[in-house]
Image (tube, helix red, strand yellow):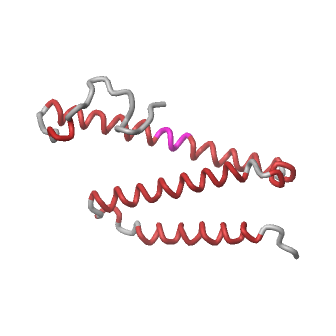
Amino acid sequence: MNNLFPNLDAWVKRQKEVKESFMKAEEGFEEADRLELILMSRQAFQHMMRTIQAFDQWLQEPMVIAHMPREMLVELWSNLRQIFYNLLDLDIKHTSEFNEYINKLSAEGKLNPILTIGRKEKETHRFPGTPSI
C-alpha cells in the first residue's frame, strides 16, 4: 500500500518516544524535589502546547477536512472534551489553592519581600507577563 503521508508515521513514532521518555522520567516523581517537578511540568506543558497546535493545524488540513469520517470526529470530541474539562478543573483548583496559600504566607509575613516589589493589590493576571483572559 502506498503511504501518502509518511510524515504521519514519523509523528506517531515521535509521540510514542516522547511518551516513553516522560513515563521513564516521572518514575518516583512523588519523591522529586521542587525543581525537578517544575521542570517536568514545564516540559509537559511545552509538549502539550506543541501537540495542541499540531492537532489544530491537522484539523485545518484540506485532506482531513474532506475525508475524516464523522465517527472519528465524534471520538475525537469525546476524548478532547474530557481533556479540556480536566485541564480547566486542574487550573481552577491549582490556582485557587496557590492563591489561598500565598495569601496565608502574606498574612503571616513570610513572603520574600524582594518578590513583592511592585505587586499591585488587584493584579489582573496570574503571573507577571502572563496575559489575563
Q: Nearer the viewer, residue 90 or 53?
A: 53
Tally of marks: 0
Across and down, in percent, residue 120 comes to 27, 26
Q: Residue at x 60, y 66 (%)?
A: 15
Relative side of 82 to 3, left or right: left
* Quadrant the N terminus occupies: bottom right
Please identify the quarter of the rendering in which residue 43 is found.
bottom left
Relative side of 129 to 114, left or right: right
Across and down, in percent, residue 77 comes to 69, 45
Across and down, in percent, residue 104 comes to 20, 33
Q: Is residue 91 above or below residue 32?
A: above
Outermost top residue:
122
Q: Residue at x 70, y 49 (%)?
A: 76
- Residues shaded magenta: 85-89
Q: Residue at x 35, y 38 (%)?
A: 127
Q: Residue at x 69, y 51 (%)?
A: 57
Q: Is residue 24 above or below residue 91?
A: below
Q: Is residue 130 above or below residue 32?
A: above
Q: Nearer the viewer, residue 3 or 99?
A: 3
Outermost bottom residue:
1
Q: Name the magenta segment's main secondary structure.
A: helix
Please identify the quarter of the rendering in which residue 27 is found.
bottom left
Relative side of 36 to 41, left or right: left
Does 37 lie within the magenta span? no
Please identify the quarter of the rendering in which residue 84 is found.
top right
Across and down, in percent, residue 51 comes to 59, 56
